[in-house]
Amino acid sequence: MRPPFPLRFLLFGLFGLARTAAAQDIPVYPPPAPYDSTGLGRTDAQTFANSQVVGMGPSKGLIVKYERIPGNFSLKSTLVGDLTSVTPRIPDYNTTVSKNANLVIKAYAPLLNHPHLKLVLGLNYDRQEFQFQEPAASAPYSLYGNIENKALTIIGTQLAVIRPVDAVHWYIFRTKGELNGDYASNELNVTDYLKVTSEFIYGWKRSPTFAWGIGVQLGYNLGRQSIYPVIVYNRTFNPRWGVEALFPARVLLRRNLSPTSLLFAGYEVASNNYNIKLRNTFATPNNPTVRSLELRQIDLKFRLRYEHELLSFLWTGIEAGYRYNYQFNAFDRTNSTRDRIINSQFGSTPYASLDLFIVPPKKLLQKAERNRK
């Protein structure tokens, strides 16, 4: 099936992205390709190293994903510490969440694609929606009214610098800026919602089937902005099994079912940090007028994921699992002390998601390989 010209133009751009994620002489896509053990010992197996290994899934250029938690689950919220001395007679807030859905759109494109230096631009949009069975009109629980009426939105852009040093060593630097919160387009103030994260990873490519690296990330993986260690471990053990890990955030065991189907199982720590502007202010012991809250969400997801090729340039992913919510807490953003105001937690529940993603077609990659040789 030959895609129309505009789509072919996009796919050629995505091919450039695939090359940024692939070893120079051993194309990662179309993985999972048949495992070629005869070529693993070649001294010219690769010219420049990176974090990808033979057998990993296809490079994704455009991703559209919809995640939904079926059924109802609980939300329990309490005020923290001596807050009740300032805002008395406010009981705990317990309700049922009747809807929690998440739409994610991501796109990546190469800005520079040289063997020794690659720059990749990324864009992302994320919208998380909630509906609650019981209204929460009283402050500070009116926070949930803000969320229900406006949803929680993330709009971001990132730049990744991928630097293959030689046949063994590589490093990656990435910086991302996002606008996170309950804003609408007509009231957006960048400084009120901006979140910035960065990471640096240095790694070693031991063979076409084994790459690993260590680094640091400045981000919000555990709710607040902090520096976290990062370990990359990508390894293909045999024609069927492999592991892909960005520890501690994500570890996945991979099963190559066929050249066009993959199965993954593992866990992921999913975290979000949103800025919320309140309609109704309230007082705390350290701040007489709280106008803005920082909402920190941390989920532990146990995942089972299946990916399959639909067309030469289009794949689908189906995922199901179980979500354990560690926290959904609110902090005073208008106070430099970042006092915690509300302790909240969702009930554990299963979830499911469906996504489509565009990848470089096999014919384009094969043609590029012939031209390179």
Image (cartoon, rainbow, N blue to C red):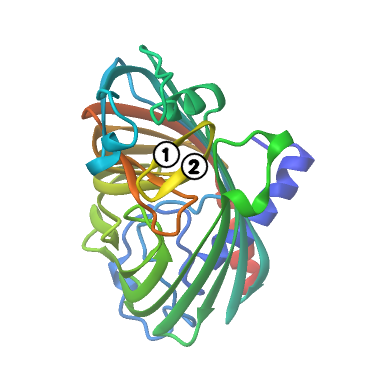
Left or right of residue 49, residue 358 in this image: right
Vertical side of 186 occupied by 142: above or below: above
Q: Residue at x 30, y 15 (%)?
A: 71
Regarding residue 13, the answer to whether it shows in the image is yes
Mark closer to the chain start, 1 or 2: 1
Vertical side of 60 occupied by 236: above or below: below
User: Is the N terminus in the top left, top right, bottom left or bottom right quadrant?
Assistant: top right
Amino acid type at circle 1 is Ala
Regarding residue 343, the answer to whether it shows in the image is no
Vertical side of 294 occupied by 202: above or below: below
Find residue 107 and report its horizontal and vertical position in percent.
60, 48
Residue linked to disc 1? 283
Residue linked to disc 2? 289
Few, some or many C-alpha atoms within 10 Å of disc 1 (few <14, some 14-19, many ≥20)?
some
Q: CA distance from mark 1 to mark 2?
A: 5 Å
Say which of 358 and 258 sits in front.
358
